[in-house]
Image (cartoon, grey):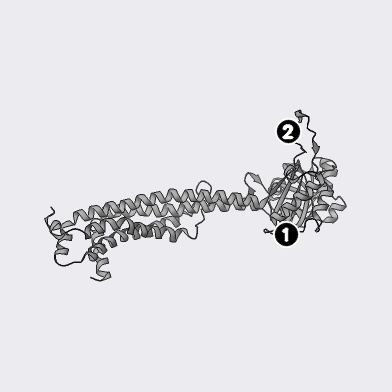
Amino acid sequence: MNFFDTLRIAWQGASANKLRSALTILGVLIGVGAVIILLAVGTGSSKAVQDRINQLGTNTITVLSRGRFGRGPATTGTQSQSANLTTQSVQAIEDPNQAPDVESVSPVVSTTETATYGAATYSSSVIGTTPAYLTAEDYTISAGSPITQADITTRKRVVLIGQTVLSNLFSTGQNPLGQTIQLGSASFEIIGVLAEKGTSGTTDEDSVVIAPYTAVEDELTGESTSFTELLVQAKSTSALNNAAAEVEDILAGEADTTVADLPFSVINQGTLLSTAQSTSSTFTTLLGAVAAISLLVGGIGVMNIMLVTVTERTREIGIRKAVGAPKAAILAQFLFEAVLLSLIGGGGGVLIGVIGTHFKIEGVTPVIAGYSIPLAFGIAIGVGVFFGLYPANRAASLRPIDALRYE
């Protein structure tokens, strides 16, 4: 008996009891669909986290002042020192001899002010910084021009505004360029509008006003010997760790301490991304394991129906063996039937899985993992073979005389 004859007989056996076969197919279908959808949710969640971290900047290291350092609380008598991020710190980090892997350094002075234009008001973050900040934080200009080094030097009162600030202060279609807004009691001219950047976690990246840090100190925060933070951009992603080490060494030298006791928080974007990827990978694996359990249940359903089928067709098996059908032909017949059910269920599961990934799940946009479809379909076939082998072998091993006597 050739391959097509075996396949035809398997199809006739599977279609003999349509409802039972349909329920078995449904079990495999649900398992395969769950594998694809849950892996897509895990992949989509991982991508969303990575995108949020990337919104923090491009190859960036953030240095935050902790205000003081020293071992133990102040009540112990341990002396605390001021932890200052100064212009000397900026110059040292910018020095290619001391930090060859650093592309740029942006000092940051930040505050929150109420922006006013006419009768409209809006409370926004105000960031005083340098031109390099825009590139490091991945901001682009949608209209107008960016702040320049000349604006820093001349302490010019000019600003760039984000899309959220724009929509709250100006009416639709109104040109904000050249207009003057009030930040607190100071007047600033709008020279540029930032392109939409979206949100990072719960932070609206478009609710921002960016100005020369010298003007912010003059008009809003008061001149200080230290900055709120430094945003350091590495020359490349591969240079991030080296750049972070160079920054830590420079700051430790200035503070006359060790890197371990550094009076600043140095946040490496690469470390955040690596940690997020590791967490997301674990999350995706767990989701895949949950989906695999449902596929296992579907496989047990395949074995169950095949055992019932063998029992129901015992006399048929005896007749076939009595007229000379070899053991291999009986084995192939029932194995093909099990694999056929799994193939149909696997194909339907892939279709359902692909359709299911077009809908957001708990706010997460699923992203189909390239390996998930062949993996799920391959597992479905494997389930058919694995769970169909025992019933098929049981059928093939029946003695003709025992099978013919079966009632």
Residue at 71% over, 51% down: 61
Question: Tag on residue 235?
Answer: 1
Question: Tag on residue 72?
Answer: 2
Q: Secondary structure at mark 1?
A: loop
Quadrant of the image occupied by residue 29: bottom left
Viewed as shown, does residue 109 lie left or right of 294? Answer: right
* Of labels 1 and 2, the one closer to you: 2
Image spot of residue 31 (x, y percent): 39, 52
The quarter of the image holding the N terminus is bottom left
Viewed as shown, does residue 286 lie left or right of 15? Answer: right
First reached walking from the N terminus: tag 1 or tag 2: 2
Residue sitting nearer the eye, 299 or 23: 299
Question: Tag on residue 187?
Answer: none
Label 1, residues with CA under 10 Å away: few <14, some 14-19, many ≥20:
some
Image spot of residue 179 (x, y percent): 79, 50
Query: Gap in Å between the C-alphas at discs 1 and 2?
Result: 37 Å
Q: Which residue is situated farthest in the right direction here?
A: 154
Viewed as shown, does residue 305 lie left or right of 205? Answer: left
Residue at 83% over, 56% down: 149
- In this picture, is 321 found above or below 84? below
